[in-house]
Image (cartoon, rainbow, N blue to C red):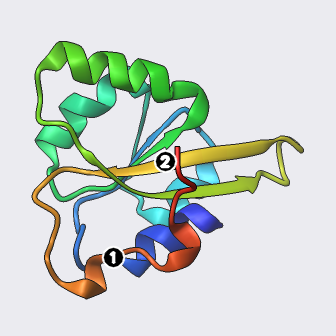
Amino acid sequence: MRLAEAREAVRSCYPDPPIIAGYAEPSAVFLMDLETTVTAGSLVPAQLNATPRALAFIEQRDKARFLEALEASGSEKPIRVGCVSGRNAFTSRRWQHFEIYAKPPLPSDPACTLPARYQCDAE
């Protein structure tokens, strides 16, 4: 699973349990961390404030709710650190796209940067 691969690549830099919004597949929890928070995009800003060294994986369909809640909260804006796309072969054939966010300040260690395959296309 690509979500787990991305998280594992920088786990030492982001040791708090990850946050997933807009995707409730149980295998993601088993592969990423049994303490993974599965939530709605609108709740991610509060969860990032509670676990500032977590990565938040926001499925594209939940991105608007995440951004609206972020704006309303007045919280410091998290930084998009990567993107992941793939298909869930067990439940659907449609492509799912995730953006990965982290709270600033980002770790300065170069090992804390996601590998190139998780870089986002320009917006």
Which image quadrant for residue 55?
bottom left
Tell me the tag on residue 99: 2
Q: Is residue 59 left or right of residue 14?
A: right
Of 69 and 37, the residue lying toward us? 69
Residue hosting label 1: 113
Of 5 and 32, the residue lying toward us? 5
Q: Quadrant of the N terminus?
A: bottom right
Q: Position of residue 90 (x, y in %)?
A: 84, 51
Which class describes the residues within 10 Å of circle 1: few (<14), some (14-19), or many (20+)?
Answer: some
- Residue drawn at x 31%, y 25% is 43
- Residue drawn at x 47%, y 79% is 115
CA–CA distance in space, label 2 to label 1: 14 Å
- Residue drawn at x 64%, y 45% is 97
Q: Is residue 121 left or right of residue 101?
A: right
Q: Position of residue 8 (x, y in %)?
A: 43, 76
Which image quadrant for residue 14?
bottom left
Q: Position of residue 33 (x, y in %)?
A: 41, 63
Dot 2 or dot 1, earlier in sequence: 2
Tell me the tag on residue 103: none
Q: Is residue 78 left or right of residue 20?
A: left
- Residue drawn at x 19%, y 30% is 46
Which residue reaches farthest front? 122
- For the residues labelled 2 and 1, say whether their Cβ atoms are less than 8 Å apart: no
Q: Position of residue 110 (x, y in %)?
A: 25, 85
Which class describes the residues within 10 Å of circle 2: few (<14), some (14-19), or many (20+)?
Answer: some
Going by the numbered disc 2, the residue's amino acid type is: Glu
Which residue reaches farthest right? 93
